[in-house]
Structure formats: C-alpha cells, structure tokens
Amino acid sequence: MLRTVTRMLATGAVALALGTGAATAAPESKDPIKITLNDWTGELISAHLIGGILQKAGYNVEYAPADMLAQFTGVGSGDLHVVIEVWATTAGEAMDAAVATGKVENLGPSGLEAREDWWYPEYMKEKCPGLPDWKALKDCAEAFSTPETAPKGRYLSGPVTWGGWDEERVQALDLPFEVVRAGTDAAMFAELKSAYERKAPILLWIYVPHWAPIKYKGEFVEFPKYTKECYDDPAWGINKDAKYDCAKPTGPIYKAAWAGMKDKWPGAYAILKDYKMDNATIGALAARVDIDGEKVEDVAADWIAKNDATWKSWGKK
Amino acid sequence: MSLAEARPASPAVFSRIAPGRLMWIAVLIATIVLVMLPANALPAWAWKYPLAWQVPFGSWISAFMKWLMESASFGFFTVHDFTRAIAWTLDLPLQFAKSVFATGFIQGQGSDAVVILPAIPWFAMIVLSVAAGYAVGGLALGLQMGFGLAYLAVFGQWDSAMVTLASVLVASLFGAAGGLLVGLACVRWRWLERIVSPLLDVAQTMPVFAYLLPMLILFGFGPVSAMVATVIYALPPMVRVTIVAIRAVPEEIRSLGLMTGCTRRQITWKMLVPSALPALMVGVNQVIMLSLNVVIIASMIGAGGLGWDVLTALRSLNIGKGLEAGLAITVLAVLLDRFAQALAVRSGAAVQGQSTGRRNILIGGLGLGLALWAAAAISQPLAVYPEAWKLSTGAFFSDIVSWINVNFFSTLEAIRTGVLLNVLIPVKRFMLALPWPWVVAVIALAGYRLGGWRLALTVGLMALFPVVVGLWPTTMITVYLTVVSVVLSALIGIPIGIASAQRPKLWRVVEAVVDTLQTLPSFVYLIPIVMLFRVGDFTALIAIVLYAVAPAIRYTAHGVARVSPHLVEAGAMNGCTRGQILKRIRLPLALPEILLGVNQTIMLALSMLVITALVGTRDLGQETYSALAKADVGRGLVAGLCVAFIGMVADRLISAAAGRMRARMGVEA
C-alpha cells in the first residue's frame, strides 16, 4: 500500500515540478536517493518531508524500510543514503561508530530535541503527591511496586541496547527502585497502554517527540538537571561518590547521510544540510497520524504544500 | 498372546539397565550437592571462567570480515565487487516477481518512473488463482484460493501481501532448487554429506539475527540480503528431505535405468527425481512455511511487505492492525501450502487423461485473467482496490485486549507472580549455580552412555564452546528458559496429541490451531501478552510455548495413531480396557516418536529466543540482538553458535536415546 501511495505521490510531484516550470536547477544525478524509513511515526513523517522536498527540487527519491540500528551498515556501503532522525540518545553510539569508518557523515542537528527520562501518568500524582520532584520517589516506591519487586518500586527502562545508566542512577540517588529492562520500545509502550487502561501504577522511560505523551497524560520526573560533569565526575551533585546522580541528557536528533552524497547530489546535500524542524511541528503531525488516523504521506504532503516559504530557502546560499 | 509374553520380559530389561540408572541417581545427588555448596568450596574458575582463558573468536571473526570486505581481492576484482555482483544477479528474478505482483513494470527510477505495464490487478489475480486452484485440486481448492485472496483485498492487505508473496515465491524457488541440488550431490558423494550435515544443523538452529549482519555486509542493505537470509533459514529441510527421498526410491527403478542404458544424468532427472516427487514436495512445503516464518525479520532489513506492516502497527500499539497483517501472512501460508500439497498429490497420482472440462476451465480462467490484466493496463485506476470496499476488524481486537486487561488483569497477575516466584526464579538460580566443568562432564557422560566415545566427544566439545568464549552465564539463562518452556510445551502438547490422535474431528480443529500458531508471526501475539503479563521471562515463556507446542502435539498424535493396529487388536482381545491399551501399548510404542517431537520442540523454542529478546530476556537471543544493534559481526555469530550448539547437543542426545529405544522395542523405524 505504501508503495502505491509513494508512487502516486511521486508522479504527482513530477507533474507539479513540470507545471511550475521546474522550480530548481536540474539535479546532478537522476539516480534515486534512498531515504530510510524507521518504525516510529515521527521518523516516517520526517522522512516523507525531506523526501517530498527533494522531489520538488527535481531529485528521484525512494524510501527503504530499515531497522534503526541495522541501517548504518547500509548507509556506510552506499546502499542507503539519508537517515533523517538519528537520536543522539539512543542511536548515537551506532552513528558514531559508522562515522568513524569515514563512510557516513553526520550532517548536524535536525532541530528536534530529544528528551528522555523517567515518566509517570498523571493519576500517579494522587498516590505520590510530591511528584514531579524526584525526591518524592524515595517515599512512595511502594506505590510503584509489583509483587516481585515489593517493597521496592518497579521502573521500566528501555531495551538494553539503549543504555541510559538507569541502574547506576538508582544506585547514585539511592532510590528504592528495581530497574526492569524492556526488550523493545513496542513492549515498553504496550506496558504503558496496559497500565493506563487500568489506572495502574507505572514508571517508565519515555522519550519525546513521541505520540505516547500526547495520547496519555502524564509528566517527567524532575531530576537534578543534567550537566556533562554529572556523567564524568563523581564529585558533582548530591552523591559525592557516584556519577549519574542527575537527569538524562537531552540530546539533539541528528541527520546523517552516506559520505558520497555531497559529490553525487551536491544540491540535495545542501538542502539536507539546511533541513530544520522542531518538536512542536513533528509532534503535531505525528498526533494527526497516530490519533486522528491520517496517512503519513498525506500529512507530510500537506505540510510541504503549506510551508513553501520555509523549505524553499533551504539549500540556497 | 504375544503381549502376555512380552510383559514379564520387561523386568528383565529393567534389571539389565539398572546400573545405568543408579549412576544417574548418583549424578543427580552430586549435582544437588554441588549447587548447595558454599561459594568458596570450589576454586573460583569452576563458577566463573577466567577472562584470561577466553578465546576471542568474536574479534577474530569481525577482523576477518573487515579484511574480507575491505582488502581481500581475487586479483582482477575484490571480494566486495564479487558479492555485489552476486547480489545484482539475485536481484533480477526478485525485481521481476515484484513487478508482476506488486509494483508493475516501470521504466526510469524514482520520481521519473513511468509504468509500462501495471502489476497484476487484484481481480485478475483472483480469477487466475481460482482457475489454477481448480485445475490442481478441484473445486474446494479453487474456492479456498478465491476466499483467501478476497480476504487480503477486503482487509486492505493486498499491496503488502503481494510484495511478500513475490519475495517468498522467489526465496522458496531458490530454497527448493538449491536444496534439491545440494541433496542430490549429497546422495552422489557420501563425503559431501558428512560435511554438509553439520552445516545444516547450524543453519537450522542459529538465530537469524546472528547471520543477518554478515548478509548485510556481503550483499548490501535491501531485499536481496533478506532473501539470502531467508534461503539459508529455509534450505536445510529441503536438503534433508531430498537425501531421504532419493535414497528411498526402490532399487528396481535404479536397476531398470541401468539396464535400459540410461546415463547417470538421465537416471537422476528422468527416473529418481520424478519417482521421489511426492516426498520432495513435502520439502518444498517446508521451505515455503519457513520462508514465511522469517518475513518479519526480513522486513527489518528492507524486504518490506506484510512484515513491515506488522512491525509498524505494533510499534504504534495498533494490535488489531498488526493482527490483520499477521493473519494475512497466515492466509498466504495456508494458500501456498494447500496449493503445493495439491500439486504433490497430483504429481504423485500422475493423472494424464485429465477431464477436458477441467482443462477448459483452466484455459478459460487463464484467458479471462490475462484479459482483465490487459484491461487494467489500459485503464489503470480500475486496478486499485477501492478504499470504500475495505473492512477492518482492527478496533475490535484492540478492544478485546483492553477489555481483558481491565477486567482480568489481577487474576493474570496472580498466575504470573506464582509461576515466576515458584518455578522460573528457582530454576534460574539452580542453573546459574551449576559449575561449568560439572555440566560439561555430565553432558559428555550422557553422550558416552547413549552413543559411545564419539558422541561423548562431540557433545562435550559443543558444551565447552560457550565456556571458552566467555558466554557461560548467558548460555545457562538460555538453557533455563528453554528447559522450562520445553517441559511446559510437553505437558500441554503430549496430552492434546494423545487425545486428538484417535478423534479425527478433534484433530481437524487442533490442526487448524497448530497451523495458525506456527505461521502467525509471534510478534503479533507478543505485544498483547506484554500488555497482560508485563515484560520479562514469564511473557517470553508464554510466547515460546505458544510457538513450540506444535511439534509436541503433531508428533505425539502421529506416533500414537501409527501404532500397528494388530497390536491394538491383540490388546483388545486380551481384555485390555481403552485406558490400558493406551498406557501399555500405544504410549510405549509411540515413545520414540514423541521424543522426536520433544526434540523438535527444543529446536523451535531455541529459534524463538531471538524474539523473546524483544521482551527483555537477558539470554543469548539478547546477545545476538545487541550484536546486530552494535554492528558487531563476530559477537553475533559467536552467540549464534552457542545457541546452535545447545540445539545440537540436545538433538544428538535425544536422537541417540530414541534410536536405542526403538532398537530395544524392536520397532522398525
């Protein structure tokens, strides 16, 4: 289905480009630029935004579904070309490794800011009135406990591959919590959905921009603010002997591309470099898809149609 | 009468093997004592294998892979060029199939694409399939094909289903043809079989995640890599079936060929292969099923199609949509399976004088289908299934899960906590407390008792491998999860198998359920299970059991039903009750078969480990998954080999035990 829609969109875009007398100069190469599709809505929208814009500039675009981490192997070998959302917080390590090989290029922040931290649904405030201050967790661990963790509370952390230093954070801040790792983020949000339906206690790792905090009301726990020293220097912060006694870093979401791109498609490369979004835009578009049930392609095309002024200046300097 | 004589004989058998039993009791006691020992009773290396003794196979493999792709060369061209050329060649049939079924023939790329000939439209596909189904398997099959495909169209799965169909068809074709050739070669040259056989074992038990990464590096990111991984996974049964089927061709046929002066090639292709065809089709069937099994994983590296839809739907917790896409995979599997089976039956019966009526319908159907295709090519909008005709039951299923969640969670939670605290955690502690030299020794001892020195050496070395690479604790967590889920699967599956073996009506229901469980991607039920049971080992346990219970049921039912009717009759004449016949005749005689079922259950449980890594287990599956995430080829392959070796140790020991049991009972296999 995705394919027909992309195809239809593609033909539509061609017609448009011809109709307006080819808005930009002819592309350097008619080979398709392959943009990866990962499996979360925000990324799908971002991918279709940049894809749509590149098409308007006359480039050929193809979308390739790919796993968030496995994709870097493909980008390095030139089989894939553009990764539009690389979260410094979760995929940063994989990207840095790929960039180190010299075959992948980090094109800088996309303007989106990832925030990830401990999060709880709104109704938990009744059971633990001191929230969102993190110190409240010390006294109401029981409210977050399950039979096998009691009397400790249960905190659902992300997949092992995400890292995140949660075990260390619990130690450093002396929180009476047990860290349980979810294997995938789908499993993590399945637990949230389950708990939210029952108004049951849950405390988990959530990241934004994401549809979950739009659909489910709740807020982040406020830990001592992250600084670089907190992660590097044990003496910093409340616990003088331990690192990680603070919140998680907020991280930019980067754009990455195959290193050969700037020679093969210099124009597209320049557009990609200038591409900028913000959390509110992507969040609102994602909500239209996940909550109102609109199609990713339509939502992206709609934004492109309404925001000429913004994206037309990209890549022109 | 024979039965009455047979019974007194059994104590004699018992006393003959008694020393062996005594030894196992001693081993058991020693094991318990070892687990109870305080931590400092044994030297530290017995529990924790020292880092300095580890062999860094992982980094060697990674370094080799890097060298292979970056520096290795054949002189005129590099290995990299060579593998990419293979990938390009393999891509041709794949592209062709995709053009026919899904995308249409397109000139130009990306936005310049101009459709020359559209993909076969849904109505033409239905007409063609119904005609083909009718021609091969009669009216019933024709209707099945029609309804199955209509389901895909009505529930909005058509486009993705056709992408999946195209890649599965091509992968199955390569798998079946490749398997046949390798199998024939193995029959011809015995030494080759000796080399290939262990490789097949590894390919069957190694988690797909483990060799996904090397595929990506060798063949590039995209559908071709996904296809090669699929073929590796689906090929082994075809090779095995070919070897058995060709060897089983009666000697007379071979002699006839020799007498009439056929060349070797003629004997193989004109006599052996055709006479073994019905059996070979069983292998083809397995290839198709296994190819559909990896649809989800293949979609993670660019195969797209239904697998991707399932992943995306579940990522946004759209359970109903995920289920619909998952069921579409099951529908494809059932249709392909039924069609292949009907083909096998027909080729077996070799009906030459087919009724002209049937042939006319086939020709008519083909003609109509092609005409419709041509019509769609002229007026392209017609070919798209109208949005307004689409149905979705998605919301319904999502609501059911939510309803169970809201109303029954506390009951489910109580069950989960009970099992976790009383079974899972104690078993896990026990396994982790075992010192590795003891475990390796006991496995080698079992090998010696069941199959002599050779077997002892083989299984002993395999058990030593995880120790040497430093993955012992992770491996023991894997063994613990596998053991608990296999025991549970056996406890559920064997009684169901026994109950349904003699009741054809019940069997039909059970078979349908088992088929669905095996072809429905486990990811589909994994997410609802997480909602009801949270992440963790219990959820993993349920997912594994749901998938791995199938062979326990199938083999038991088959084994019990297969017991010679003469023996059953003899029992009945001696005045045995039904219960006695079951307990004293059917079950003991079916035991070797049941054991093989358990063996298969272990294999399937191991293959599910990768999936359970997705719900937070910390086993070897997680290790391969993390290795994929970190792009560490060596680490993934080493962890994959550990899983493969667990499977092979279990397989070798159980096969040896089943063989001995058969020999002792005098039942010919």
Image (tube, coloured by chain):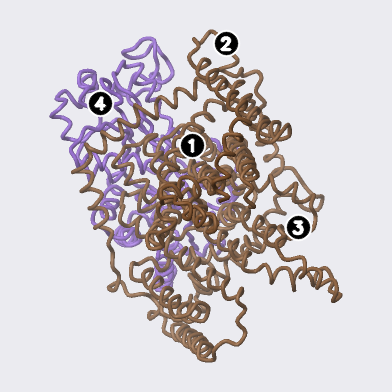
Chain colours: A purple, B brown
Residue type, label 2: Leu
Q: CA distance from mark 2 to mark 1?
A: 27 Å
The amino acid pointed to by label 4 is Ser
Task: Name the one closer to the observer, B115 or B337.
Answer: B337
Share a chain, discs 3 and 4? no
Nearest the viewer among A48 and B347 is: B347
Report the mark closest to the observer, 3 or 4: 3
Of circles 2 and 4, which is in front?
Answer: 2
Residue at label 3? B187
**Residue density around tag 4, few if under 14, some if 14–19, many if 20 or more, within 10 Å:** many
Of residues A303 and B444, the one nearer the viewer is B444
Distance in Å between CA atoms under marks 2 and 3: 50 Å
Q: Which residue is mark 2?
A: B42
Mark 2 or mark 1: whose residue is earlier in sequence:
2
**Residue A169, horizontal then vertical, whole percent:** 36, 21
Same-chain check, marks 1 and 4: no
Q: CA distance from mark 2 to mark 4?
A: 38 Å
